[in-house]
Image (tube, coloured by chain):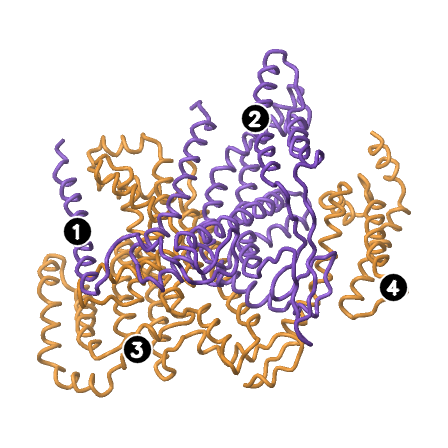
């Protein structure tokens, strides 16, 4: 109770600063004839977005444009996270290999990509590496994949009744959880082990493919087809066109973050005492059981928290997309929309709030995870 | 079991080892000849069979030399660490092939086919890199748009700051205790003066130079003043020297000099290149550390207001990407300033990056504070130290020692983040590269520029990480 004065002073100081800024903002905005409000979100955006996952046109609203940007951000973040995890696992384990060459190779990868600014890597991929690619009319293609300077053209799947397939997939995932818990209960009762992994994989494959077998939902493969526009130029029609912005962002983000994940994986595996493995072996567990029941649970406890942090960093770093004109939330919203409407405070606050809510939800998950899996002893 | 028997069997068979060595060398040398000297000894084979030949001969060779103990030392080492099973042997072979295939390409691009001479684009005729481009633009990459004839100011200030920075290492034992004060307070202040009045320039430089001269002079004389009078000496003498210098000695001459020969004002928009990278990272490093330390202490404080303010502050900055922070400082922050007030872009960027990185530093330091056993706090309290004394003399020195790697990582991240200042229109080295790239006279040399900048950044960051590793080893104490 005696420390009330310093706290009160801090509070007053904070309020004074906030009040000062708000006052200034009010004065400035009224001077410039601007008004505060989010109503502009309902107006038509009237600008184009190159790459969008959902339907979008010039007539769509600003809110729709924001959604397009958000989905693009999530798309690149999600695919980057998957590839970065793969790279991290591979090189993290490779760094612990007794093989001198593999070890050094992984070390080279980590030291090389970790010590270069992400923006530089991004520019390198976008402005230098991908600019060497051929034009559409010069490319030869590989199994209906055409990597050109304009886009990477791949075959795409055209679905009928995709939603039924997806519902079945979700159902399968839920079923896996139920079956897993059930089998664990039985295992505790009977003391017998069931091949949980194989059963879940089977469920995941069989149930969604039921819809394909019975012909409820079907898909066709659509191949990109070359179309001559003039003598020395052409383009591909059909299939899926992945823009180079996405490719370079994806490569840069995953190669960069992969190094950090590799270090986490290495630290996690190194962090397990040799005695743990020996103790597990001495009570008669076989190699697979040692890995699954003793090493991995402990290693994951060390690996997962910093790796989640890296996922978060990757998501935040995907905002660098603005530098190479990949239409993510920063470019679409804090770039184009801000320029058109001039509503700096509203738009910057929405953009920041987007990232804040992503990272806060991940940190809430982290806290939950830490509470659930942290060692209860000590 | 079968495998075991085989290896036992092979232990005696020296001939198979020789055949194995021969096969490995065959595949490696064929590939080497093909990729380095462009002699394809297997030209009679179709390309898919060539690949199979390289791999099968290499793998067979590795399989044949695999044994538990041969008489040859080198083979034993190879077997032990890179050829202990088929998978490992395969990966080894893959990496060897990769190195052989990639090395000549990189070497020829970097050196043999590259152009070094000349001053125009037309002289870049080779297949490889055009280092002429980097050579011609080097000045811009280093100094940005800073006027050529004024660049000695940047050089001079950087050199003198480096010398002043190294001064701590050569300080005598007597002054060692003032080192922290020097590095935390005096050195940043001097560097600020250097950057602001020397690199920025303007006649105002002379006004402040009196202060510096007065401070240095009085410090030097102060060394010879008896201890008794030191307090009064430092109370009176510096100010009187300052007044004397300013109003009596050189007043008119220097004003004239300042008008005639004074430095031209170079606005921060013209700063750029590598020197701007250094300036931004240097100041952000200096500022983010103390702010981060205070935030870390605040987060562990027992006062709820301070605690929740720190938590909110840290989580906010950690939750948003730096690029949106810079956007905010560029487009939103000017709205929050009083009318007519103008904050320089560079200053704003430095503040933004410092606050941003401070949140990360705070979390790192908090980790160190949490790792200290409670006994340290209790012991410090029991000998009667207050909050600040306890932290300054007992807790922080130990906690900081623990988190050297984490802090170094944050600092490296900071240096790697500096290129982002392109958002507000400041062009450090990567920004300059992008500008040079679009110059109509020099189109098509993006690769060279990025490689050049990459080498520089890599050296800086790698050196920082190695230095932090050394520090970590130096301060490692068993606890």
Q: Which residue position is annotated with label 1? A: A19
| Residue at the farthest top position | A189
| Chain for numbered disc 4 | B
In primary-sequence order, the first of circles 4 and 3 is 4
In primary-sequence order, the first of circles 1 and 2 is 1
Place of residue B308 in the rendered image (x, y in percent of width and height, measured from the top left): 26, 39
Give the color of chain B as drawn.
orange
Tell me which chain appears purple. Answer: A
Q: Marks 3 and 4: in contact by CB < 8 Å?
A: no
Q: Which residue position is annotated with label 4? A: B42
Residue B463 in view in this figure: no
Q: Which mark is residue A177?
A: 2
Residues at marks 1 and 2, CA–CA distance in whole angstroms: 52 Å
Residues at marks 1 and 3, CA–CA distance in whole angstroms: 35 Å
Q: Residue at x 48, y 63 (%)?
A: A325
- Closer to the eye: label 3 or 2: 2
Q: Which residue position is annotated with label 3? A: B266
């Amino acid at each position: 109770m005696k420390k009330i004065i310093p706290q009160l002073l801090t509070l007053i100081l904070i309020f004074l600063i906030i009040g000062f800024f708000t006052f200034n903002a009010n004065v400035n905005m009224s001077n410039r004839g601007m008004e505060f409000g989010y109503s502009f979100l309902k107006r038509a955006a009237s600008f184009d977005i190159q790459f969008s996952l959902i339907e979008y046109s010039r007539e769509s609203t600003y809110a729709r444009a924001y959604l397009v940007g958000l989905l693009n951000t999530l798309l690149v973040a999600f695919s980057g996270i998957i590839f970065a995890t793969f790279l991290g696992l591979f090189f993290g384990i490779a760094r612990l290999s007794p093989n001198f060459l593999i070890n050094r190779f992984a070390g080279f990868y980590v030291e090389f990509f970790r010590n270069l600014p992400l923006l530089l890597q991004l520019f390198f991929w976008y402005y230098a590496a991908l600019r060497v690619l051929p034009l559409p009319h010069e490319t030869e293609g590989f199994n209906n994949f055409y990597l050109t300077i304009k886009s990477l053209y791949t075959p795409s799947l055209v679905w009928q009744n995709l939603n039924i397939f997806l519902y079945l997939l979700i159902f399968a995932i839920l079923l896996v959880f139920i079956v897993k818990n059930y089998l664990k209960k039985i295992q505790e009762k009977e003391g017998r082990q069931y091949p949980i992994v194989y059963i879940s994989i089977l469920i995941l494959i069989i149930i969604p493919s039921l819809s394909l077998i019975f012909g409820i939902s079907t898909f066709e493969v659509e191949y990109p087809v070359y179309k001559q526009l003039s003598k020395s130029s052409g383009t591909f029609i059909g299939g899926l066109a992945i823009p180079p912005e996405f490719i370079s962002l994806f490569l840069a983000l995953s190669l960069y973050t992969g190094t950090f994940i590799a270090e986490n994986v290495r630290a996690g595996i190194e962090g397990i005492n040799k005695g743990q493995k020996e103790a597990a072996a001495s009570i008669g567990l076989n190699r697979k059981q040692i890995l699954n029941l003793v090493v991995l649970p402990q290693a994951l406890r060390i690996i997962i928290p910093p790796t989640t942090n890296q996922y978060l960093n990757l998501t935040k770093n995907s905002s660098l997309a603005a530098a190479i004109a990949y239409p993510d939330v920063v470019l679409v919203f804090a770039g184009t929309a801000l320029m058109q409407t001039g509503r700096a405070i509203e738009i910057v606050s929405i953009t920041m709030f987007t990232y804040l809510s992503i990272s806060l939800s991940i940190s809430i998950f982290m806290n939950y995870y830490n509470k659930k899996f942290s060692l209860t002893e000590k | 079991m079968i495998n075991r028997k085989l290896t036992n069997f092979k232990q005696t068979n020296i001939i198979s080892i020789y055949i194995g060595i021969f096969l490995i060398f065959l595949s490696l040398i064929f590939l080497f000849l093909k990729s380095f000297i462009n002699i394809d000894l297997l030209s009679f084979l179709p390309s898919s069979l060539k690949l199979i030949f390289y791999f099968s001969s290499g793998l067979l060779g590795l399989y044949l030399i695999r044994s538990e103990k041969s008489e040859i030392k080198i083979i034993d080492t190879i077997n032990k660490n890179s050829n202990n099973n088929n998978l490992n042997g395969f990966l080894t072979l893959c990496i060897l092939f990769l190195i052989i295939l990639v090395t000549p390409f990189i070497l020829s691009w970097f050196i043999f086919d590259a152009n070094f001479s000349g001053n125009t684009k037309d002289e870049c005729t080779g297949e490889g890199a055009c280092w002429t481009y980097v050579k011609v633009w080097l000045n811009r990459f280093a100094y940005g748009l800073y006027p050529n004839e004024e660049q000695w100011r940047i050089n001079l200030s950087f050199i003198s700051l480096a010398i002043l920075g190294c001064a701590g290492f050569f300080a005598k034992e007597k002054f060692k205790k003032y080192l922290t004060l020097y590095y935390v307070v005096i050195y940043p202040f001097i560097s600020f003066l250097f950057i602001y009045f020397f690199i920025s320039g303007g006649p105002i430089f002379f006004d402040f130079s009196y202060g510096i001269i007065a401070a240095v002079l009085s410090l030097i004389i102060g060394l010879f003043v008896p201890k008794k009078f030191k307090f009064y000496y430092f109370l009176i003498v510096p100010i009187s020297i300052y007044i004397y210098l300013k109003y009596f000695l050189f007043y008119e001459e220097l004003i004239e000099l300042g008008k005639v020969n004074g430095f031209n004002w170079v606005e921060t928009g013209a700063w750029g290149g590598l020197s701007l990278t250094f300036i931004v990272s240097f100041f952000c490093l200096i500022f983010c550390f103390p702010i981060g330390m205070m935030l870390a202490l605040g987060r562990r404080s027992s006062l709820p207001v301070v605690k929740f303010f720190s938590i909110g502050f840290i989580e906010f900055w950690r939750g948003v990407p730096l690029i949106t922070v810079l956007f905010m400082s560029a487009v939103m922050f000017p709205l929050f300033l009083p009318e007519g007030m103008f904050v320089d872009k560079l200053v704003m960027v430095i503040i933004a990056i410092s606050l941003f990185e401070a949140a990360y530093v705070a979390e790192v330091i908090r980790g160190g504070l949490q790792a200290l056993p409670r006994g340290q706090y209790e012991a410090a309290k029991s000998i009667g130290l207050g909050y600040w004394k306890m932290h300054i003399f007992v807790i922080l020195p130990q906690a900081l020692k623990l988190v050297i790697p984490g802090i170094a990582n944050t600092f490296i991240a900071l240096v790697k983040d500096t290129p982002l200042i392109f958002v507000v229109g400041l062009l450090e080295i990567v920004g300059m590269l992008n500008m040079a790239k679009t110059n109509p006279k020099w189109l098509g040399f993006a690769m060279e520029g990025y490689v050049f900048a990459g080498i520089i950044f890599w050296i800086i960051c790698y050196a920082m990480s190695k230095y932090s590793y050394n520090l970590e080893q130096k301060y490692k104490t068993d606890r």
